[in-house]
């Protein structure tokens, strides 16, 4: 079952690297002007309102269509098929969402030939994949904690809210924030916040965050790379309504002729415990060099690690490195091969390796077995490579 696809949809790999840097409010205060007309708010007031809207209470009932567009300057990507997360690294993709409360939600991801749906209605959870004509009834067991741990997405997982929450969660001295002219997003009047990195070594020119003028729910996030007039990444509503969705959106009956199966989720199985332990071990291997927008993640990796297919067994006989094949079993070797073709050999006092640069992200694979990734210039990433 590809439910992980939904959870990862809102933040593709490159965007995650961009927003991982710490961001801050700064001292800038600006009046809102322009059309449409909204009450004046300072940057600090808008930040506080957005944080409260996303943290202190559940999102309001809503439904809408979200579009994500990525233009990262990657080489041509191979066809990974359907709704693979890797396909989200380029082009435009849509997802539809209905949210009636924490126990009533629906997410639909249409592709060219089929559609996947995850429907939650109280204790009734269904996953429908029209591509293979399969309906999976998900049974949740265990205590309330285990039930809430089930990877069923709310609006924040597949809308601009997920990106915006990360932007607003790490406010510090590395970012200047100002309020610019109001805008219309998905037919809604919205405030626009502009976040500008103070670090010159960042590849990010600015991030534009549109907040709904009534609910303060993020409607759109756009990330601009330096020297680009168009956003390198954006996710935003193309249509949204803040009203209670109709009850039929949360009901599901398997169509005639569909294959119906059941899957139980809840508690901690032996496999779940093993995966959790592997995740902890992987986290121990990762370190961060620098701070703010020029922070660089450093983790152990080799060319063999990156090119390993899901069915291959690495030398250590384990699969705890997340880059060894997609998390959903996707073979990423074709993608790695394409990206490495554009790599540039580099060297310095730190050693030698291969450098890959996109509009928003630079990666360095060193010959001594390290992978460095950040939304930074090549100079910044090679500087980080010298810190061991």
Image (cartoon, rainbow, N blue to C red):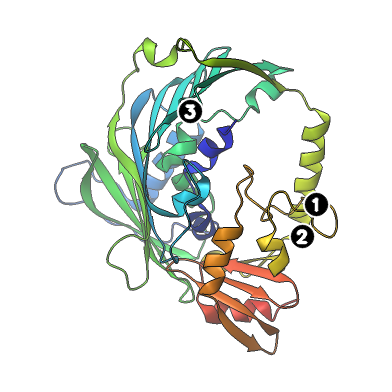
Label 3 to label 1, Cα distance in Å?
34 Å
- The residue beneath circle 3 is 57
Rounded to the nearest angstrom, the CA distance separating label 1 from label 2 is: 7 Å
The residue under the point 43% across, 63% down is 76
**Residue 210 appears left or right of 380:** left
Question: Percent position (x, y) of residue 122?
Answer: 54, 12
Tell me which numbered mark, 3 or 1, is placed earlier along the sequence.
3
From the viewer's perspective, is 9 left or right of 227? right
Name of the residue lying farthest toward the left = 35
**Relative to 352, is 193 above or below?**
above
In this rendering, the answer to whether 57 lies above or below 211 is: above
What secondary structure is found at the residue carrying circle 2? Answer: helix
Q: Residues within 10 Å of mark 2 (few under 14, many from 20)?
A: few
Q: How packed is label 3: few (under 14 Cα within 10 Å), some, or many (20 or more)?
A: few
Q: Are marks 1 and 2 in contact (CB under 8 Å)?
A: yes
- Does residue 176 appear to the left or right of 186 in the view shown? right
**Residue extending furthest toward the bottom:** 349
Tell me the quarter of the image containing the C terminus.
bottom right
Between 288 and 212, the residue placed more toward the observer is 288
Q: Position of residue 249 (x, y in %)?
A: 39, 16
Disc assigned to residue 285:
2
Q: Are marks 3 and 1 in contact (CB under 8 Å)?
A: no
Provide the secondary structure element on which disc 3 rests: loop
246 or 270, which is in the foreground? 270
Q: Which residue corresponds to the image point at 74% horizontal and 72% vertical from the top-left?
A: 369
State the image coordinates of residue 126 (x, y, percent, origin top left).
54, 18
The residue pinned by badge 1 equals 281
């Amino acid at each position: 079952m590809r439910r992980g696809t939904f959870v990862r949809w809102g933040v593709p790999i490159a965007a995650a690297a961009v927003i991982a840097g710490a961001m801050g409010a700064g001292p800038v205060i600006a009046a809102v002007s322009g059309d449409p007309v909204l009450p004046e708010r300072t940057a600090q007031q808008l930040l506080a309102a957005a944080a409260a809207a996303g943290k202190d209470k559940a999102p309001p009932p809503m439904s809408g269509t979200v579009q994500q567009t990525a233009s990262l300057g990657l080489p041509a990507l191979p066809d990974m098929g359907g709704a693979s997360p890797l396909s989200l690294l380029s082009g435009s993709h849509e997802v539809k969402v209905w949210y009636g409360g924490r126990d009533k939600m629906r997410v639909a991801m249409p592709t060219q030939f089929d559609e996947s749906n995850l429907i939650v209605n109280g204790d009734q959870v269904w996953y429908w994949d029209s591509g293979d004509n399969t309906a999976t009834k998900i049974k949740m067991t265990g205590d309330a904690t285990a039930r809430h741990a089930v990877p069923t997405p709310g609006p924040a997982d597949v809308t601009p809210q997920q990106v915006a929450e990360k932007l607003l969660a790490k406010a510090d001295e590395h970012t200047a924030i100002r309020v610019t002219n109001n805008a219309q997003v998905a037919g809604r009047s919205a405030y626009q916040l502009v976040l500008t990195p103070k670090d010159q070594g960042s590849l990010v020119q600015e991030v534009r965050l549109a907040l709904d003028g009534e609910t303060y729910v993020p409607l759109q996030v756009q990330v601009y790379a330096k020297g680009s007039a168009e956003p390198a990444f954006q996710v935003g509503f193309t249509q949204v309504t803040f009203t209670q969705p109709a009850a039929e959106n949360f009901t599901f009956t398997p169509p005639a002729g569909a294959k119906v199966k059941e899957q139980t989720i809840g508690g901690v199985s032996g496999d779940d415990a093993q995966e959790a332990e592997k995740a902890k071990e992987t986290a121990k291997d990762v370190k961060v060099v620098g701070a703010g927008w020029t922070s660089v993640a450093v983790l152990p990796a080799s060319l063999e690690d990156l090119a390993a297919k899901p069915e291959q067994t690495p030398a250590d006989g384990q699969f705890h490195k997340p880059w060894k094949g997609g998390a959903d079993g996707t073979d990423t070797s074709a993608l790695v091969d394409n990206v490495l073709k554009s790599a540039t050999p580099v060297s310095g006092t730190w050693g030698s390796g291969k450098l890959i640069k996109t509009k928003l992200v630079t990666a360095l694979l060193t010959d001594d077995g390290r992978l460095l990734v950040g939304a930074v210039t090549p100079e910044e990433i090679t500087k980080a490579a010298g810190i061991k």
